[in-house]
Image (cartoon, helix red, strand yellow):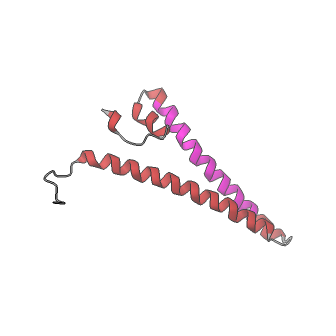
Amino acid sequence: MGISDTAATLDSIFPIIANIIFWAIGLAGTVALFMIIFAGYQLLFSGGDAKAVEGARKTLTFAILGLVLIFLSFMILSTIGHVTGVVCLENIAQGHFGFASCQ
């Protein structure tokens, strides 16, 4: 019924890793976006307090830096894949997660 006759092999670990990377990048982007919104609220409701404004600016700076690094990670993977000729990295950088073309 629900039991398969085939055993899991090492070939099944690559799609799992690809899915983990895909969801981790999505989660990191979502957290960065919420941190930008949170920093905006902190800035709006700081009430002119210099310490609160500085804290909000630091939060905003680090959130934007994190979001830029997330976007740069795709560019870095694409560049490394293009220079080395590794098709897998180019596919991942283009958002096609999976290691089927790595053969």
Specify the quadrant of the image occupied by residue 57.
Answer: bottom right
The picture places residue 18, in percent across and down from the top left corner, at 39, 47
Q: Could you tell me which residue is drawn at 58 percent across and 42 percent down?
A: 72
Q: Could you tell me which residue is drawn at 68 percent across and 59 percent down?
A: 36
Magenta region: 56-81
Q: Could you tell me which residue is drawn at 33 percent across and 46 percent down?
A: 14
The picture places residue 64, in percent across and down from the top left corner, at 67, 53
- Against 94, residue 2 (above or below) is below
Disc count in the image? 0
In what quadrant of the picture does the C terminus appear? top left
Give whichever of 82, 41 is nearer the camera.
Answer: 41
* Side of 103 relative to 88 (left or right): left
The picture places residue 12, in percent across and down from the top left corner, at 27, 48
- Against 47, residue 96 (above or below) is above
Is 42 contained in the magenta span? no
Specify the quadrant of the image occupied by residue 92.
Answer: top left
Overall secondary structure of the magenta section: helix
Most extreme residue toward the right is 48
Give whichever of 79, 3 is nearer the camera.
Answer: 3
- Against 51, residue 70 (above or below) is above
The picture places residue 63, in percent across and down from the top left corner, at 65, 57
In what quadrant of the picture does the N terminus appear? bottom left
